[in-house]
Image: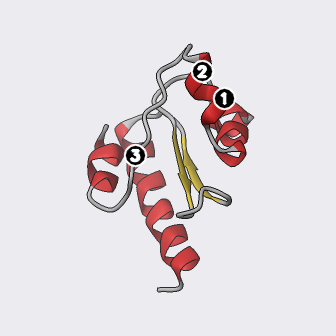
Amino acid sequence: MAAIKKLRSKAVFVYLPTGDKEKWKTMPEVVKTALQSPEAGKTIPIIAITDAESTKLIYLIPHGSEKELKKHYREAKKKIREAVGK
């Protein structure tokens, strides 16, 4: 939750309830692939960060401990800066 709170002010979040097959069909392929990858794990929440067009995965934040989430958040910020050229 800490990562979500920190990223909330800097991103657009799309919530996908588990088991909603109709919404799943409308998700961008890059998000589906990321959420189904071994790196995503099986526990929710999982955060897939993409570019504005949802065509490129920038970073994936799997569920984890507070310490792990802080590490992922720092890495995600770095990857986002690289992606937008700042």
Q: In this view, does 21 lie above or below 65?
A: above
Q: Nearer the viewer, mark 3 or mark 1?
A: 1
Disc 2 element: helix
Q: How far apart are marks 1 and 2 (CA)?
A: 5 Å
Q: Position of residue 48 (x, y in %)?
A: 55, 46
Determine which quarter of the picture holds residue 7: bottom left
Residue indicated by mark 2: 22
Q: Where is residue 69 in the image (x, y as percent from the top left)?
A: 42, 45
Q: Name the residue rendered at 67%, 58% in the picture.
A: 55
Please identify the quarter of the rendering in which residue 45 is found.
Answer: top left
Crowding near the residue tagged with mark 3, few <14, some 14–19, many ≥20 C-alpha atoms within 10 Å: few
Q: How far apart are marks 3 and 2 (CA)?
A: 18 Å
Above or below, 86 relative to 22: below
Image point 46% across, 86% down: which residue?
86
Q: Which of 60 and 33 is in front in this view?
A: 33
Instruction: Please report contact status of discs 1 and 2: CB closer than 8 Å, yes or no.
Output: yes
Q: Which residue is drawn at 41% across and 35% down?
A: 65
Q: Where is residue 14 in the image (x, y as percent from the top left)?
A: 44, 41
Q: In this view, does 49 lie above or below 1?
A: below
Query: Is residue 84 left or right of 24 when viewed as pictured?
Result: left
Label whose residue precedes the other's in the sequence (3 or 1): 3
Residue occupied by mark 1:
25
**Sequence-earlier tag: 3 or 2:** 3
Residue type for callout 2: Glu
Amino acid type assigned to the residue bearing label 3 in the image: Phe
Helix, strand or loop under label 3: loop
The local secondary structure at tag 1 comes to: helix
In this view of the protein, which residue sits in the foreground, 3 or 25? 25
